[in-house]
Image (tube, coloured by chain):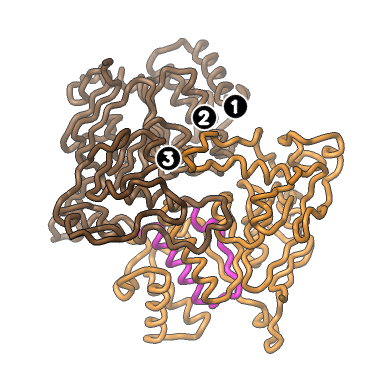
Amino acid sequence: MSKLLTVRDLVVEVPSRRMKIIDGISFSLEAGQTLGLVGESGCGKSMTCYAVANMLPRGIERTGGSIEFERDPSKSGRAADPTIAMIFQDPTSSLNPVHTIGYYLESALYRNQGLKGNDARLEAMRLLERVGIDRAKSRLRAYPHQFSGGMNQRVMIAHALAAKPQLLIADEPTTALDVTMQAQILHLLEELKAETGMALIIVSHDLGVIARLADHAAVMYCGKVVETAPVADLLQRPAHPYARALIDCMPSIDPADLEPPVPIPGSVPLLDSLPKGCHFHPRCSRATGECTALFPSPSAIGRVHEASCYHPVAA
Amino acid sequence: MTAPLLRARDLTKAYHHKTGVFARPTSQLAADSISFDLMARERIGIVGESGSGKSTLGRLLLGLTSPTRGTVCFEGVDHDDRSSQDWIAFRKRTSLVQQNPLAALNPQMTIGEQVAEGLLVHRAASKAAAQERTAAMLERVGLSSAMMTRFPHQMSGGQRQRVVIARALILDPKLVVFDEAVSALDVSVQAQVVALLRSLWQERDLAYVFITHDLRIVRHLVDRIAVMYLGRVIETGDIRAVYEQPRHPYTRALLASVPTIDPSIRNIEPPIKGELDPDKVSQGCAFRSRCPFAIDRCTIETPLLRAFGAQRAACHRSEEFAGPMKPQAAAPPRKELA
């Protein structure tokens, strides 16, 4: 399979404060595959997405590394790059409150597919129905405040689909939603992936969401990828102590399992005062002297399973 | 038998709203005939989707909003009979922790001032003693006493929630309502707060109501659970009994919706479609429009809570949900009853 996206040694910085938000991460994604990015708040998951989508906020710059896309040989310039769409955590604040849902979708259809008038309206209705909003015709005249969070997230997905993306980036798409709505949105994403063959980058702090959707997962901590593995390997045989700890702090719903979740001691260090060596060592029970000296380079655990740790957890 | 700490009877709260200038106001029941007792040191979880009336119930219990019908009685005194002096005493003995700690904290006051404020307002301690107790309380919730001079914006989300918990517990309340207290936090920080709440409960004379939509977390924090749907309690009972053998299709759907870290569970249909629809609750079971097991009887007769061992459920077909849950087979096969 060809690589749709290859990220090499990506560095993202706040130049004014000389602070590295993302410090040399590499990953790749094949067409139609799903990559899960997992980690605690502030580990750089969202910034990685913004860098890939080329929409880093002002004051934050990519200062190193490369992001390469598979280019369409029949086109030239930017048009040859794959189309990327993105959805966010808080759908209600991502939508403009003064525009109707119909205006929002139809303008996206005009921009991306050149559809106008009735064609655009019909396509907008089809998209709304596809993402599970019934009575689409009357709903096109509705405003975001008239919708629930789950419905607005569906609208965001419909808007993303209007671009016919080859890559959809979903940044914590279900974090603000109820469990029932989360199950519905996750299933919708599964279906759309199968239908359109688009690749997906899913970001979440919840390993349950990653387990459900991702083929391959990257665990991030303090701007670095500390472990990458096929998702089943990561969940069953995590190598990095941080990945192990993230799994242990997931509460289970199995009534026979009475153990409460095991918290990770301490907290994520601030980016301007990162510990030397492996950033996780102050919170890690396996840390030794060498962990405090130099950040470990990734070593192979399995065939496509790598972890940056001097003392990986035995399988 | 000892008297309950808190007794709610037939609690009902109606909200009225108009859809247009000339439209007739419609009313919606955010809480509908809810009754339960909470003993001292008991922990109850209230779960349901957004809009099910969980937060309204929490506010009714604390007297932050008055019920349309029904009563709340705390330590033998009815909310309706409280004088303003009684209300002050009640406020001293109860507390509320809300979802968004940044909104709950005053941005212009230091952490120390905010945590100590309750002690000073209720004249429970001198200024010097309040300082000391605040420092001790902050250390107890896992923050250093050096944090006292900081402001909320200088802290992380998890630290802020610890501050709110410290502030809620500084007066040693008998009852705390936690309204989505951990929902906004990362899974790893959630686990820390869960461990903190478990140990704080161990060492105190504290009862609490834990409101959440997260069925994974609540299990480790409460003894009893009540599942709400559009203002009604549709299933309640011992936490273990309800999780092992949910008797209401809504509870089963909620449990089946929780994503697990088992990567073999994929591409499963969502257990229930749609979301809460308050327009459909005139008669019969409010859940029937989304229920895969609805029968004719559900449209006519509103199911009442019926006892099944350590739990009670409000469903006409509860007897059929006898087996434990499996992740993929969330419910028995559909069958129409005459």
- Do labels 1 and 3 touch, CB within 8 Å? no
What kind of residue is marked 2? Answer: Val
Report the residue at 52% width, 11% height from top: B128
Q: Determine whether, in the image, residue B262 is placed left or right of residue B49.
A: right
Position in image of residue B231 (x %, y %): 26, 45
**In front: label 1 or label 3:** 3
Report the residue at 71% width, 44% height from top: A271
What kind of residue is marked 3? Answer: Glu
Position in image of residue B277 (x %, y %): 27, 57
Q: Say whether disc 2 or disc 3 marks the residue closer to the N-terminus.
A: 2
* The N terminus of chain A - image quarter: bottom right
Report how far apart the C-alphas of labels 2 and 3 lie in the structure: 15 Å
Name the chain letter of the residue that bears numbered label 1: B
The local crowd at label 1, few if under 14, some if 14 to 19, many if 20 or more residues have their Cα within 10 Å, is some
Q: Among the chains, which one is brown?
A: B
Residue under pointer 1: B143
In the image, which residues are magenta? A148-175
Residue B163's label in the rendered image is 2
Q: Is residue B58 visible?
A: no
Q: Quadrant of residue A145?
A: bottom left
Is B306 above or below relative to B326? Answer: above
Discs 2, 3: same chain: yes
Position in image of residue B317 (x %, y %): 25, 50
Report how far apart the C-alphas of labels 1 and 2 lie in the structure: 8 Å
Residue under pointer 3: B180
The local crowd at label 2, few if under 14, some if 14 to 19, many if 20 or more residues have their Cα within 10 Å, is many
Is A293 above or below relative to A49? Answer: above
